[in-house]
Amino acid sequence: MNLAPLRAALTRHKRRWRALLVVVALVIAAAVVTAVLNRSPSIATRSQFVAGTPEPASTAAVPLDTTLYLPASTPAPAVLLAHGFGGSKTDLAAQARDLARHGYVVLTFTARGFGDSGGLIHLDALNYEIADGSRLIDYLARQPEVLQRAGSPVIGVGGSSYGGAFALMLAATDHRVDAVAADITWNDLATALFPNDQAAAQSTGAADPSGVFKKLWVGYLFSLSQPSAAGPAGPTGCGRFAADVCQFYRTASENPASVTAADKALLQRSSPATVLSRLKAPALLIQGEQDSLFPLSEADANARQIRAAGAPLQVRWRAGGHDADSTDDSVNTWERQFFDQKLRGESGGNADGSFLLAQRNAGLSASTGQSVNKT
C-alpha cells in the first residue's frame, strides 16, 4: 500500500494548522498591544455644589453644580471649562476627560439659571456669572490636587459661545487665570445683537438708530431657558431669565426701535468689550467662519482689544460656527495644546501673534476621497 499520498496530505494539514496558529497568535498579540496603548490613565471624579453669588435682594448663596476631574498624577495645572447657552456641565464631559488624561485637573460646572444649578440668567453679567467664576477659582485654589506656583493656583479657563465670553471676562477681571481660550463668542453683545446700530445709522441717515435686531437668534436662545426644580423661575413668562434681561427681550421683540440706552447698557455689562483692557493672561481666540450670530468681526474686535492691552494672543478662524458644525474636533486639540504651552511651559504649538484660518474643501482625503478643510 502506497502511503506517500496520505503522508503528504497530513504534512499539508500540519502546515496549515501551524500557519493558522501563527495568525491567531499575532491577532492576540496585536489586541494585547492595542489594549495597552489605548488604556486610559485612571480618572477620578468628584461632584458637588459650590456656593455662587447671591441673587439681588438675597443673602443665600446660589448653588453651582460642578464636577471635578482628577488625573492619575497630582498636583497638576487646572482648567475651568464653561458650557454654551442652554447647556450644562455634561456637555463638557468628553473634553474634561481628555484634558484629565493629559494630566490636568478639570472643573466643569453648570452656569446659574441652567440645569441643576440655582439662580437666574444674567447673561454673563460681571456681578453674577463672572463673580461665580471667581468663586469657582477659590474652590480650585483650595484643592490639594491643583498645582500652585508662587502661592497661586495654576489655572486656565476655556469655553465656547456663552462660555467663551465667560472665559474672557473672568480672565480679564481675576488675574489668577494664567491662560484663556475662547471659541465663537462675542465682543460687544449690544452690537452683536443689533448690528449697524447708532453709529452706522447716524452716518447713513437710516431711520432706525437701533440697528437690525437678530430676533430669530434671540428668540431661539430665549426658548432655551425653562424653569426647573433646581432654581427659582424668573417673572411669569420669562423662564429662568432675570427680570431686567427678560424685559429687554420683550421690548426688543415688540419694537426694536424702542430699545433704550439703558437696554444697550445692560448688554454691554455682559460684554468682554467692557473689561478686555485689563487682560494680562495669554489668550487663544477661535472663531467660526460660518456664524451669523457672532461673526468674525466680533473676534476681530476682541483681538484688537487684547493686543492693545499687551496680552499675548493667538488667533484661529475655523470652519463652522453657530450656523454650521465644525467638520473636525480640532477646537479641543488646539485648546489643549495652548494650555500645554501656557500652563506647563511645553514647547511647540503656535507662536504668540500667530493667525491661522481654515480653507473649506481645500483638499481631498486620501483615505475617504471626501473633501476636507485645511488650515
Image: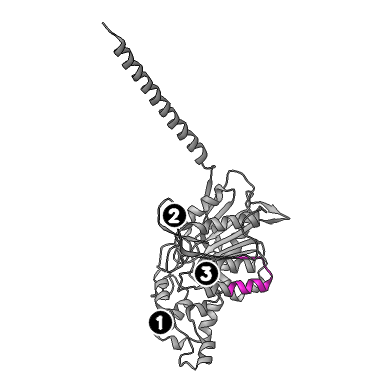
Towards the viewer: 207 or 113? 207
Q: Residues within 10 Å of mark 2 (few under 14, many from 20)?
A: few
Kindly report which numbered mark, 2 or 3, lies closer to the viewer in this rendering. 2
Residue 199 position in % (x across, y down):
54, 88
Q: Nearer the viewer, mark 2 or mark 1?
A: 2
Labels 1 & 3 near each other (Cβ < 8 A) = no
x%, y% of residue 103?
59, 48
- Looking at numbered disc 1 in the image, what kind of residue is underneath it? Ser
Secondary element under disc 3, as helix, strand or loop, is: loop
Q: Is residue 25 among what the camera can see?
A: yes
Residue under numbered circle 2: 365
* Disc 1: which residue: 253
Question: In the current view of this chain or complex, which residue is farthest to the top?
Answer: 1
Q: Residue furthest right?
A: 150
Q: Mark 1 to mark 3: distance in Å?
A: 22 Å
Answer with mark 2 or mark 1, whichever residue precedes in sequence: 1
Tell me the residue that label 3 is attached to.
Answer: 185
How many residues crowd around disc 1 within 10 Å: few (fewer than 14), some, or many (20 or more)?
some
Which span is picked out in magenta?
301-315
Residue 71 lies, in percent from the top left, at 57, 46
Please name the residue shown 52% across and 82% down the image: 264
Instruction: Residue 213: name its quadrant.
Output: bottom left
Describe the element under mark 2 as helix, strand or loop: loop
